[in-house]
């Protein structure tokens, strides 16, 4: 069967927002925790949504930390008001061609809504799912979307920029589509995860989609 649906990750896939996540969390957590956090410290807390990860790094006052984080996140986002070049055109073309489109991210609902609004991405996706408090839950969310669509998961691709996205796609039974167009993307590491396809540019991704529809 030809490709029928595409489910996209957000950070590093649709937009160059990874720095905003890390720096916003650092600015919010350091005054409350009373210590410095390296990028590695922040990355280590990822998995749950921000609502789940912030209590781990700033347990002294996680509610204030979340409020401050959302404020910093929106402030920092003013430097990133568009998704990666070509993404809006890609999504528009996919919709016109009849593809089912969804977004599944590990982000929390609040930061996802900020990113969607600031980068003008509202209206492109049929289904949207965000992260969970308890930990990583992308496979479950991907399965939810596929079930809602009522299609074979083998006819759907999950599009992400890190190796864990390949694992999530495999667990959900979809195609694992890796993209390495973000500045932080590691194409070598992605390739080591044996995705079904690895694209280094939006143009290359478009070409793969075209072939997959034939």
Image (cartoon, rainbow, N blue to C red):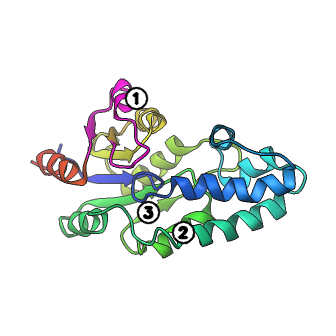
Residue located at (44% from left, 34% from top)? 163
The kind of secondary structure element at disc 2 is: helix
Q: Percent from the top left, x then y, of residue 23?
A: 63, 55
Residue annotated with mark 3? 127
Residue 77 shows which numbered tag? 2
Q: Is residue 74 left or right of residue 213?
A: right
Nearest the eye: 39 or 97:
39
Residue located at (75% from left, 51% from top)? 54
Compared with residue 81, is residue 167 higher up or lower down, i.e. above or below? Answer: above
The kind of secondary structure element at disc 3 is: strand
Q: Is residue 58 left or right of residue 105?
A: right
Identify the magenta region.
179-200
> Circles 3 and 2: CB distance less than 8 Å?
no
> Circles 2 and 1: CB distance less than 8 Å?
no
> What is the crowding at mark 2: few (fewer than 14 residues within 10 Å), some, or many (at least 20)?
many
Q: Percent from the top left, x then y, of residue 177?
A: 32, 41
Q: Earlier in the sequence, mark 2 or mark 1?
A: 2
Q: Percent from the top left, x then y, of residue 18?
A: 52, 53
> What is the crowding at mark 1: few (fewer than 14 residues within 10 Å), some, or many (at least 20)?
few
Q: Percent from the top left, x then y, of residue 123?
A: 39, 75
Residue annotated with mark 1? 189
> CA gap, disc 3 to disc 2?
23 Å
Q: Is residue 183 magenta?
A: yes
Nearest the eye: 163 or 36:
36
Q: Earlier in the sequence, mark 1 or mark 3?
A: 3
Q: Is residue 147 magenta?
A: no
Looking at the rendered image, the disc whose residue lies closer to the viewer, 3 or 2, is 2
Determine which quarter of the picture holds residue 90.
Answer: bottom left
Q: Residue furthest left?
A: 214
> What is the crowding at mark 3: few (fewer than 14 residues within 10 Å), some, or many (at least 20)?
some
Nearest the eye: 173 or 66:
66
> Circles 1 and 3: CB distance less than 8 Å?
no
């Amino acid at each position: 069967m030809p490709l029928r649906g595409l489910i996209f990750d957000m950070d590093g896939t649709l937009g160059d927002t990874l720095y905003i996540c890390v720096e916003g969390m650092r600015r919010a957590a350091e005054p409350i925790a009373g210590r410095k956090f390296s990028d590695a410290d922040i990355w280590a807390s990822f998995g749950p949504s921000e609502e789940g990860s912030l209590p781990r790094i700033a347990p002294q006052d996680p509610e204030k930390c979340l409020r401050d984080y959302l404020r910093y996140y929106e402030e920092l986002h003013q430097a990133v008001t568009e998704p990666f070049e070509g993404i809006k055109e890609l999504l528009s073309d996919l919709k016109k061609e009849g593809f089912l489109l969804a977004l599944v991210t590990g982000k929390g609902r609040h930061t996802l809504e900020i990113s969607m609004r600031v980068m003008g991405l509202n209206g492109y996706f049929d289904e949207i799912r965000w992260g969970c408090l308890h930990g990583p839950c992308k496979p479950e969310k991907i399965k939810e979307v596929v079930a809602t669509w009522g299609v074979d998961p083998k006819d759907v691709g999950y599009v992400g920029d890190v190796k864990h996205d390949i694992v999530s796609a495999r667990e959900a039974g979809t195609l694992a589509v890796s993209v390495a167009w973000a500045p932080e993307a590691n194409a070598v590491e992605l390739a080591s995860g044996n995705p079904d396809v690895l694209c280094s540019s939006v143009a290359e991704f478009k070409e793969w989609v075209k072939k997959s529809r034939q």
